[in-house]
Image (cartoon, rainbow, N blue to C red):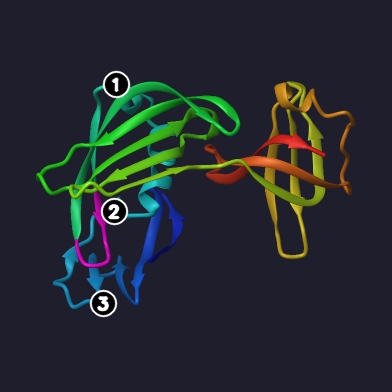
Amino acid sequence: RTQTSVGELGAQGLQPKRFGDKYKQEVAAHFDRDKGQVIFSANSTPQTLQAAAQDRLSLFAQFAALLAGSPALRQPGQTFALQVVSSKSSDAWTFQVDGPDTLTLPVGKTEVLKLSRQPLQTYDQTVDIWLSPNHGYLPVKVRIAQTNGDVLEQSFPLFWVSGEISNFTRAASGHWYFSLKDEEGQIRCVMFRGRNGQVGFMPQSGDLVEVSATLGMYVPRGDIQLTIQTLR
């Protein structure tokens, strides 16, 4: 089974355009913002499209923009609702901020903020999400449980990337900022002082390197970036 989400970044964060769900054959939901409707390829009745609507994939990344920009919303006990679109329907999902927690991930102990979906019906799936303040409130762990006992749990891993350093800058804070590029594109990177102090050389633009990293977001610009853990 494969799910896909395609969209763009708008004034309210992520704005999905199409959500696909493929098992043997694909069914999809189309976000028609001109008509203000969600239109389904499975011939389900079109539904009203709310401005902040998300699909079942974009939802998790949207939390980063939503909570990073709203400190009051991060307080334990706070609740908020979003229209969440699947391939055949849409529903209002209500989430509660459960409070701070600590997870042990491949990068070590990570301070997180835990959210949970508040089911309306007994057959609704439960969703628990752990967001990392140090990574722009992007999710680092997601747990989805069905009422039949099936559970999907995903922790966002440490991964390796190689490329050429460009636009290398050492800030007064001691943090390193640069981009990694190859023949297909580039991505912004940050390596914080506590990590780069373990690198045995001073990188410079033009160096070919391999890094281990986690995915993060620079909230003021809404840019996806890599948070570098090791560099060699």
> As drawn, is 13 to the left or to the right of 41?
right
| CA gap, disc 2 and disc 3 | 18 Å
Q: From the viewer's perspective, is residue 44 above or below residue 98?
A: below
Horizontal relation, residue 28 to residue 171: left or right: left
Residue bearing mark 3: 41
Residue at the location (77% across, 22% down)?
172
The N terminus, quarter of image: bottom left
- Reading the image, the residue beneath label 1 is 76
Q: In the image, is residue 134 above or below residue 55?
A: above
The magenta-colored residue range is 83-89
- Quadrant (top left, top right, bottom left, bottom right) of the C terminus: top right
Q: Residue at x 52, y 37 (%)?
A: 219
Q: Nearer the viewer, mark 2 or mark 3?
A: 3
Q: Nearer the viewer, residue 132 or 73?
A: 132
Marks 2/1: CA distance?
23 Å
- Taking the view exactly as shown, the residue that stands out farthest to the front is 149
Q: Is residue 192 visible?
A: yes
Residue 9: x and y in percent read: 46, 54
SS of the residue at dot 3? Answer: loop
Q: Which mark is residue 53?
A: 2
